[in-house]
Amino acid sequence: MIMNRRQMLIGLSAAALPQPIRAEGSRVILRPTKVDMVVEGRLIEMIGFNNSVLGPEIRVGQNETLSARLENTLEEGTMIHWHGIRLPNAMDGVNVLTQDAIIPGGSFDYRFAVPDAGTFWYHSHYLSLDQVSRGMLGPLIVEELDPPEVDQDITIQLFDILIDAEGNFDRTFYPSHYTREGRLGDVMMAFSSSSQTRVGERLRLRVINPSVDRVFKITLQGMSGVVVALDGMPLFEPQPLDDMVLAPGQRVDVIGDVDAEVLVLESSSVEPLLLTKISATGSRDKRNAAITSLPPNQLPQPGRITQSVGLVMQGGAGGKPHGGFGSWAFNDVSGLPRAPLLSAQRGETILMQLRNDTAFPHGIHLHGHHFWETDERRAPTVLRDTTLVEAGETKEILCVFDNPGAWLIHCHMLSHQEDGMATWLQVA
Ligand code: C2O
Ligand code: CU
């Protein structure tokens, strides 16, 4: 069966993941280079950082400073965004709003403290639909001062890739990709930083969805555990481990004990697809200690709501007409308007109503902040930096805007972003 063949080959490429780069006290150099990836037995030319696709995992301790120089060895501009990190605006890596594209041959020094422990990631934020789909991304792990006791701390990156008839990376412009779900790849894969475990081991799995447009639904088999964090932020109370839906950009941290070989399955369709597995050889005594919640990060608590702002998602196939020039729009505008969606005083708590008036789901990502999802009574539930809003759904989020600067908010389905679904806000 084709799926098994894919599986085997994907396993081979995943095994080639490089060792994580430790970033304390030394500058990380990131250089995008052409790298081949094995997909279905063929070499596909991608772009990865430091000869690796997907890019190297960067690890740094909480409150440490991450210093990274991006050297642009490409023939086009680029820049890096540090997804989910609450950093100074000038380090956010957003074209026009925070920096100009780094020209070919140029470089840029990113340097910022990492206030929150958790699972984050970095990616190109320039021509990002193209550059991210070609591999310009990697995990950014901020370690707790006192990390939970586990046998292995494993990163699992979900990805998909579009292949043309000749078996090469497909960069054709398909109008339908822009007006529907986006550019979904025809091969789905998962890269695990470990391929071996033992029955009885306690694992921390950091699942990241850096794919450009695909919403993954992941089922884990072979371990029993709990979800301990979403988008890098610890849950106040761990949630039972169930199917996990990850919009592009989102992360889920799981801690659990291994019962058997661990299977990572994509379960959106009736017939689940095996993406990768962590084989179990041997065993160890199960740990008795219960799995507890991770230490919380220090974020400001929401106060009295001082503004309510609506963000209406419009457009796409079957959508009502709107005033923007692209396929997609927020509040009748495609792309960044001259005036921000909202202006906040530093520290203001603002309620944002995200209304999806389209026939497709959107993963809305806010830069520079995390926000609270809320329940029916508008009480905060979980912190996220990206939230999935289903077709026809309205979600209310609460955000304490305490990070000054001009911040992007956009759909993280990068085809949608490229075709209009982005705006910005200003924090004084
Ligand atoms: Cu992960 Cu604006 O991006
Ligand atoms: Cu979208």
Image (tube, rainbow, N blue to C red):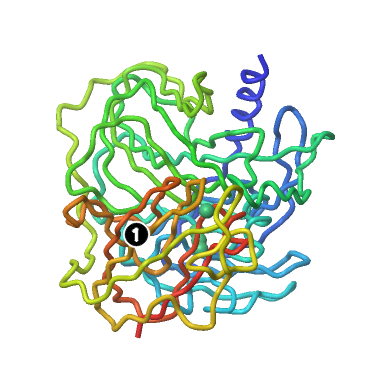
Q: Quadrant of residue 283?
A: top left
Q: Residue at x 20, y 52 (%)?
A: 295
Percent across and percent down for residue 61 are: 34, 59
Percent across and percent down for residue 112 are: 42, 73
Q: Residue at x 17, y 56 (%)?
A: 379
- Left or right: residue 369 versus residue 67 is left
- Residue to which mark 1 is pinned: 61
Q: Residue at x 74, y 27 (%)?
A: 41
- Badge 1 crowding class, 10 Å Cα cut-off, few under 14, some 14 to 19, many 20 or more, is many
Percent across and percent down for residue 72 are: 69, 68
- Left or right: residue 13 versus residue 368 is right
Q: Quarter of the image for the C terminus: give it.
A: bottom left
Q: Which residue occupies the foreground of this view, 394 or 203?
A: 394
Q: Quarter of the image for the N terminus: give it.
A: top right
Secondary structure under badge 1? strand
Q: Residue at x 38, y 22 (%)?
A: 221
Image: 78 above or below 19: below
Q: Quadrant of residue 23?
A: bottom left
Image: 248 above or below 364: above
